[in-house]
DNA sequence: AGAATAGTGTCTTTCAGACAATATATG
DNA sequence: CATATATTGTCTGAAAGACACTATTCT
């Protein structure tokens, strides 16, 4: 129960308007040893012609998780991929038109599932390599520029063109930065990397290592990586050998199967 | 550009309604060696009489961060506390009245700042000790009950009464569980614990250890804890000695000052 | 002295990182 | 055999965990 004064001072008609709620999806993949992100070129104002993270409005009859799954189906034609909530961006002026808050999701997609990306239609979509994201996400607020938390980085498009993170639509440079740092942070204590494996029922430890290297953007020691993965996963029965690779260039690698149990 | 068919099939009038957006604040503190959470007793339907996390509607002229800061000021009279976004809960049926999505925030407050909690008014508010939260947050979706991710836990009120997490309003048991697991996960690689220190410019390592123990809900080795903290923080110049404690019961402890730089 | 709390030292095991060596395929 | 890749082994130093010991205050 509030006093009358409290009630009046806290009363504000704008309180009863509702903001628009969108769900933005960061569709990451690892191809050609690089971490890449699906962006679409905007064909309307604001930010006409700028590259942006795909997204869409949250419908009244679906949760944000469901909206994200729907949107990635519509945008990239993929289903059953790993999808996790990243952060909710809500700065008042982040959309110049009206008040929009965006629940950002992060999707990890094997590059093979994105092959029919060209079929999306006239809408311009492309995979961009993420270059030079620096820093740590620890203790940082994704939505404030404090503590040098949003330095510039670059995105390299399929035709070799390079754009600066500042040339993206809206506050999308912050969302992307947050996602990359989050992936790096979670890489070694979650199953995140397995979301990028082309075929989880048959993969090599080299494939898995290249995924880790793409996300971290640095080379890893081959032997140490194998030792760690085998300790963390094979010992716990979460991956198991399933026969040697066929038709390899050098020595054929052992294939592994990922079991999602536990 | 979509085809007409795509446009029509994706058109849905409910798409243009906007959900209500609220900000819920988990106000944690550590008092008497226990992790405690501020809950309020609801005085209206739904869930009349049930305990709930304080919250409020997001206004059109404030970001979620700002709304959370405002709300904690209104509810607990505290300012300048550590506040971080936890997760956004958006299940369609999480509020029986209407569609409400909630951006949950986690606040870490020194118990001394909550002393005038009794002055909140007739609204029933109390600190509850969190007992028996188990499990890991790794790989789990906070909003789905998969993988045994939401087991029951207990809350002990100030008068000794114990309530089950299932007796809380809405999906608040999930929100609380998510928060506790998140705090445990972030404890040793962020500055989270310092948010509970009564006076960051003068604290003992024992006070800091008791905070860690309260969050983890298990005792820590005294010597090992000191060694780790001194390595991580004192070596980096983030804490520094500032003279011995006065008037202690046993041997006076060294006092430290926390410097927030870098 | 005894109680109470603060602080140090030591030993073992685990793990990360650097790096060398060996194994198995193809051409 | 040369080349290419996979896989194993070894060494070192850092760090976690268990635990014993010493130090300083008060009554």
Image (spheres, coloured by chain):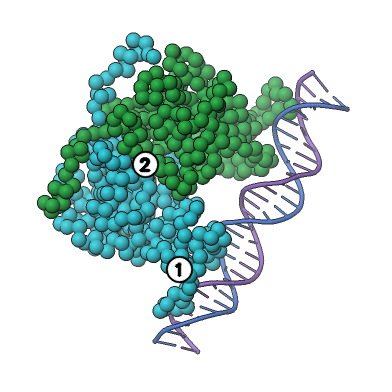
Chain colours: A green, B cyan, C purple, D blue
Q: Which mark is residue A201?
A: none
Query: Circle 2 — which element?
Result: strand
Q: Residue at x 24, y 62 (%)?
A: B116
Vertical relation: B206 (above or below) A14: below
Q: Position of residue D13 (x, y in %)?
A: 69, 56
Of residue B225 and residue A7, the one placed in the foreground of this image is A7
Q: Is residue A120 visible?
A: yes
Label 1 belongs to which residue?
Answer: B204
The quadrant where residue B14 appears: top left
Is residue D15 placed above or below A73 in the rendered structure? below
Q: Residue at x 25, y 46 (%)?
A: B55
- D6 vs D23, left or right, is right
Q: Earlier in the sequence, mark 2 or mark 1?
A: 2
Mark 2 vs mark 1: give the one in front: 1
Viewer-nearest residue: B155 or B77: B77
**Which residue does the image show at 43% across and 32% down from the upper left?**
A172
Q: CA distance from mark 2 to mark 1?
A: 32 Å
**Residue B29 higher or lower than A172, as above or below:** below
Asked whether the beta carbons under mark 2 and mark 1 sit within 8 Å of each other, the answer is: no
Would you call the spot at circle 2 few (<14 residues within 10 Å), some (14-19), or many (20 or more)? many
Q: Which residue is mark 2?
A: B87
- Dot 1 falls on which chain? B
Residue A110 seen from this side: no
Mark 2 chain: B
Residue A28 image point, x, y percent: 50, 29
Q: Position of residue B188 (x, y in %)?
A: 49, 54
Q: Position of residue B37 (x, y in %)?
A: 31, 55
């Amino acid at each position: 129960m509030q006093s009358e004064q409290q009630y009046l001072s806290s009363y504000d008609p704008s309180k009863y308007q509702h903001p628009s709620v969108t769900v933005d999806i960061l569709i990451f993949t690892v191809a050609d040893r690089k971490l890449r992100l699906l962006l679409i070129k905007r064909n309307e104002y604001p930010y006409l012609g700028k590259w942006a993270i795909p997204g869409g409005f949250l419908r009244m009859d679906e949760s944000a998780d469901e909206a994200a799954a729907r949107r990635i189906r519509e945008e990239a034609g993929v289903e059953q991929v790993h999808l996790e909530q990243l952060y909710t961006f809500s700065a008042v002026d982040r959309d110049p038109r009206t008040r929009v808050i965006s629940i950002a999701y992060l999707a990890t997609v094997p590059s093979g599932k994105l092959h029919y990306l060209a079929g999306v239609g006239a809408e311009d979509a492309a995979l961009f390599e993420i270059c030079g994201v620096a820093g740590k996400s620890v203790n940082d607020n994704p939505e404030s520029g404090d503590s040098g938390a949003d330095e510039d980085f670059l995105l390299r498009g399929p035709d070799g063109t390079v754009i600066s993170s500042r040339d993206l639509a809206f506050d999308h440079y912050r969302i992307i930065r947050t996602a990359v740092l989050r992936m790096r942070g979670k890489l070694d204590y979650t199953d995140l990397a397995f979301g990028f494996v082309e075929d989880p029922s048959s993969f090599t430890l080299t494939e898995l290592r290249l995924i880790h290297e793409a996300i971290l953007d640095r080379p890893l020691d081959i032997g140490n990586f194998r030792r760690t993965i085998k300790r963390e996963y094979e010992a716990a029965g979460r991956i198991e050998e399933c026969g040697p690779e066929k038709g390899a260039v050098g020595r054929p690698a052992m294939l592994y199967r990922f079991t999602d149990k536990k």
